Image: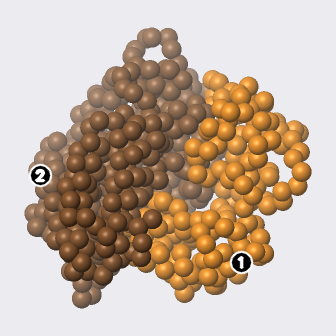
Amino acid sequence: MGYPHPSHPKETVVLSKYFGDVAARTFDGWVKRGGYEGLKKALAMTPEAIIEEMKASGLRGRGGAGFPTGLKWSFMPKGDGKPHYLICNADESEPGTFKDREIMRWTPHGLIEGCAIAAYAIGAERCYIYIRGEFTEPWSVMTRAVEEAYANGALGANSFGSGKRIDMVLHRGAGAYICGEETAMMNSLEGKRGNPRIKPPFPAQAGLFGMPTTINNVETLSVAPYILMKGAAWYKALCLGNPKSTGTKLISVCGHVQRPGNYEITMGTKMTDLIDMCGGMRPGRTLKAVIPGGSSVPIMNVQEVNGCIMDYEGIVAAGSMLGSGGMIVMDDSTDLVYQIMRLAKFYAHESCAQCTQCREGTAWTTRILERILAGKGKPEDLELLMDLADNMTGKTICVLSDSCAAPVVSGIQKFRGEFDAYLNKLRVPAMAEAR
Amino acid sequence: MTDKAAPGSMIHHETAPHEPVFVGPVLAKLEQLFDKYPTKQACLLPALWMVQEARGWISEQSIAETGQVLGLTPAFVKGVVTFYTMYHTHPVGRHFIQVCTTSPCNICGAEDVVQSVLKETGCGELGTTSPDGRFTVIEVECLGACGFPTPLLINDDFIENVTPERVPGLLQGYK
């Protein structure tokens, strides 16, 4: 459903079916709704068969990178005698994204079930669910649900009598966007500063505590029970023409639409249709720009939005990326230069400061944008920002730096007039003084 | 929607002389975690949450104590404490208010909410504590509730759809 609103007929409701249904939060409530059947079925299969089913479904990672899930699971070594770990990434912090929060708040057992399936498939006896520190209610709901799952035999030494041990540990973050990056999360879980690690080695070789590790997003893992219950063919058929992007995707729509919320769409839905499903723009306002996949992806202009098909390839073709599915809609009241500065400030605040290009680049970018907004921009500033962005892209350990550059570069390329208005003093400064 | 009771729920604000945190039930709670991780070091973030829950903030002495319990040096623990924004390295007001001002909320009026919160709490400036010790207010980057602008986190209560007009009423519940 377009939670918190009633579902829209154009949505394809799978993961969001029970959003808002308080009874679905309990173990019994979840079982009554068909829950835990996917896990029971999985425990009767071989890990290899589960991975084949996941591969056949076409499911790709819903956290942002879009890597094929079954393939990721297949990278885990077999018969190596080492402990394996599963990490569920519930550190949702990408500006514009608020879907994992709703999954945890309303269908905690669906997530636990998905984690248990994945843990069994990759040969892990233990799964850590890393929940961002600010998510206080999801933490409480998940804590209760894990306790219930143990009490009812879904988790523990003998999951549903299968003889398989599956343990689940909730781990609370403490305020750091970068810990959503997979190797930073591993360091954080190990009790360290959340600095991303250089890859290789990749997590499947040497991840958490140096052991083979798979890390998946909340939404990705929550899909697994449905794929096992209803079959890969069913999931794969949930697409509107592009077999590379299958299934449904929760899109968190925020900003200047009339009904912001989480909308579950079939891959391939038109972006303009989705905006209509959200009630369209506010009265008297027109669309100016969309950031479709969380703040780390390029900004789209109206022309790009109009032809855009919402799936992994479709949004790339339209000049941006699907990312995490956090869609920020901005109307003609938006000062894009100011908002791009806010995003740069976000990345400057969240940089772990390990790499020079990121530590310096995010801060410089913010300062230059503030200077422009204060009416003190220099004619060469846009060129300087582009040059900085080039130095910040593809040159660091993780992609936080690239993420800061994306809105800046796309903003200057697609909305240059807004920058020029400040530079040419045709616009009243938005800030008193550059800080 | 208001969320109640999470981990490390209440923030306490006494800054009484340091007394060890990891004794009795708190130590037992920490030791229960040791089985869940292959190293003691992995219990550092949970241990720091326990310190903050007990004392309201994490002092140099608490840093040293936590290090001792987990077999880590104070310098290492301090490096971790200061990496994460939710750990307080100084005492804060009885109620700690975080207002999201990242772009999705920003375009929906978050900065007006900040101004209203600063005015109503008497904090005046971000990061400071009100003269009566009741509130500390900070801006926070993306709280992950962008569809419900503007969210506020008051202690562990997550409050959605806050407008400047709602602020005075909301604060009345926090004495």
Q: Where residue A281 appears, x then y in whole percent?
A: 26, 79
Q: Nearer the viewer, residue A159 or A126?
A: A126
Q: How crowded is mark 1: few (under 14 residues within 10 Å), some or many (20 or more)?
A: few
**What is the quadrant of residue A54 in the picture?**
top left
Q: Distance between the residues labelled 1 and 2?
A: 50 Å
Q: Where residue A415 appears, x then y in whole percent?
A: 18, 67
Q: How crowded is mark 2: few (under 14 residues within 10 Å), some or many (20 or more)?
A: some
Q: Where residue B95 appears, x then y in whole percent?
A: 71, 67
Q: Which chain is orange?
A: B
Q: Mark on residue A317?
A: 2
Q: Residue at x 45, y 11 (%)?
A: A80
**Count the marks: how many?**
2
User: Seen in the image, is A87 located left or right of residue A275?
Assistant: right
Q: Which residue is drawn at 46% across and 25% down?
A: A207
Q: Which of A53 and B1 is in front in this view?
A: B1
Q: Mark on residue A110?
A: none
- The local secondary structure at tag 2 comes to helix
Q: Residue at x 16, y 50 (%)?
A: A316
Name the residue that disc number 1 marks: B173
Q: Which residue is drawn at 47% across and 53% down?
A: A349
The three-letter amino acid code for the residue at tag 1 is Gly
Q: Chain A is drawn in which colour?
A: brown
| Residue A91 seen in this snapshot | yes
Seen in the picture, residue A333 relative to A434 is either above or below; the reply is below
Seen in the picture, residue A293 relative to A207 is either above or below; the reply is below
User: Seen in the image, is B112 located left or right of residue B40?
Assistant: left
| Residue A76 seen in this snapshot | no
User: Seen in the image, is A54 located left or right of residue A118?
Assistant: left
Badge 2: chain ID: A
Q: Where residue B65 appears, x then y in whole percent?
A: 80, 36
Question: Do marks 1 and 2 share a subunit?
Answer: no
- Asked whether disc 1 touches disc 2, contact meaning CB atoms under 8 Å apart, the reply is no
